[in-house]
Amino acid sequence: QVQLVESGGGLVQPGGSLGLSCAASGSIFSINTMGWYRQAPGKERELVARINNVGSTNYADSVKGRFTISRDNAKKTVYLQMNSLKAEDTAVYYCNYYTKYPRSLEVWGQGTLVTVSA
């Protein structure tokens, strides 16, 4: 059993910055990928960024150069630093955990709302 608890969402003005964190607990396997997805109203959930246990990262083109994902394996926590925020970044952000070991497992957090508005 794996649980994810997100924090850090809120309201920010365009051009501002916000940081999200996601703490994992339970039966965490050391080989895993953690990431952030988002879902805006009326749109499908999309990948924002992900990072594996050795630090390899992937970013959506729309956030490259503005968002940075990082993780602390000892704390079982993944972070998302969001800079130069735009109105189109407004969405519910979901933390995701995925591993193939010892069997395939995918877990989602409850989501945290990020609103970018003047």
Image (tube, rainbow, N blue to C red):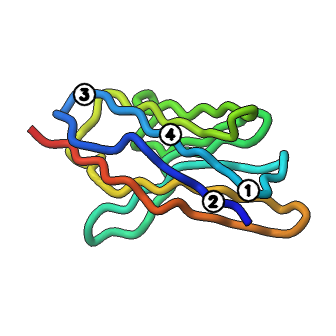
Residue 22's x, y, as percent? Answer: 54, 45
Quarter of the image where the N terminus is located: bottom right
- Crowding around mark 1 (Cα neighbors within 10 Å: few <14, some 14 to 19, many 20+) is few
Q: Nearer the viewer, mark 2 or mark 4?
A: 2
The residue indicated by pointer 4 is 21
The residue indicated by pointer 3 is 16
- Asked whether the residues under the numbered discs 2 and 1 touch, taking CB atoms below 8 Å apart as contact, a structural biologist would say yes
- Asked whether the residues under the numbered discs 4 and 3 touch, taking CB atoms below 8 Å apart as contact, a structural biologist would say no
- Amino acid carrying mark 4 in the image: Ser
| Mark 1 or mark 3, earlier in chain | 3
Residue that lies at the very extreme toward the right in this rendered image: 102
Quadrant of the image occupied by residue 99: bottom right
Label for residue 99? none
Q: Nearer the viewer, mark 2 or mark 3?
A: 2
The residue indicated by pointer 2 is 3
Whether residue 7 sits left or right of residue 5 in the image: it is left
- Whole-angstrom CA distance, mark 1 to mark 4, is 17 Å
| Mark 2 or mark 1, earlier in chain | 2
- Amino acid carrying mark 2 in the image: Gln
